[in-house]
Amino acid sequence: MKYSIQALGIFTCHFLTILLSVSLYSQEWQTPLVKGYGEIKYFDQAAQQPDPKSEYKLIFDIKSDQLKNGVNKSLWIIARTMNLLHVGKVPPANVKIVAAIHGEASYIVLEDISYKEKFGKLNPNLDLIEKLEEQGVSIFICLQALASRKISFNDIHPSVTQAISAIAVVTNYQLKGYKLMPI
């Protein structure tokens, strides 16, 4: 009898472990706020969760042209951040995100015509940029980066704000209490 109870306990423990593992891996990827970008899986049992009472003031320094799922990886990470904060029930008023774009990433803000002239296809980032801006993300382009790449102001998507430099954007927002996000 003693061994039967032990065996039942061991079986139950293994069964629950398997059940938990299956539920973790069977969950579908989702994009609840920024539709189509920044896929997440939400785990309500995770020890660290977004705090709905906190204000998230984040700045992303975007300089890489690396891709993730066909768009700029850094923009994709911003979408993921927003999706995670959303499922964590952080109110939109408590989420303030800024992107400072420069360096090789500068081309991601080109209008379709200019992007197609340079790369032979339409700009895959514009849909994501528009969706991020709809959710309140402020997107800045460094004019120093544009000048060094001989990109005209007229070639930039109209919703992107021009800044004297990415350095100015990053430092100004850090002075306002924004946290620089590593990407």
Image: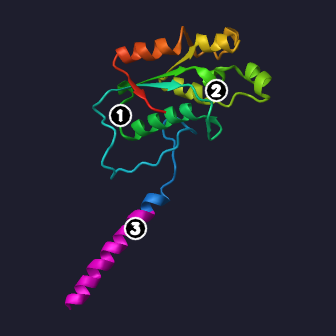
Q: Is residue 66 left or right of residue 21?
A: right
Relative to residue 112, is residue 46 drawn left or right? left
Residue 37 place in picture, x, y as percent: 56, 38
The magenta segment? 1-22
The first of marks 2 and 3 along the sequence is 3
Q: Residues within 10 Å of mark 3 (few under 14, many from 20)?
A: few
> Marks 3 and 1, how far apart in space?
29 Å
Residue named by callout 2: 126
x, y (%) of residue 137?
48, 23
32 sits left or right of 103 in the view: left
- Check disc 2 and report its element: helix, strand or loop: helix
Q: Is residue 18 magenta?
A: yes
The image quarter in which residue 57 lies: top left
Residue at 29% from the left image edge and 30% from the top image edge: 54
| Label disc, if present, on residue 19 of the rendered structure | 3
138 drawn magenta: no
Badge 2, how many Cα within 10 Å: few under 14, some, many 20+? Answer: some
Horizontal and vertical percent position of residue 127: 63, 29
Measure how far apart labels 1 and 2 are at the Cα level: 26 Å
Residue 76, relative to residue 163: is it above or below?
A: below
Amino acid on which disc 3 is placed: Leu
Q: Which residue is mark 1?
A: 90
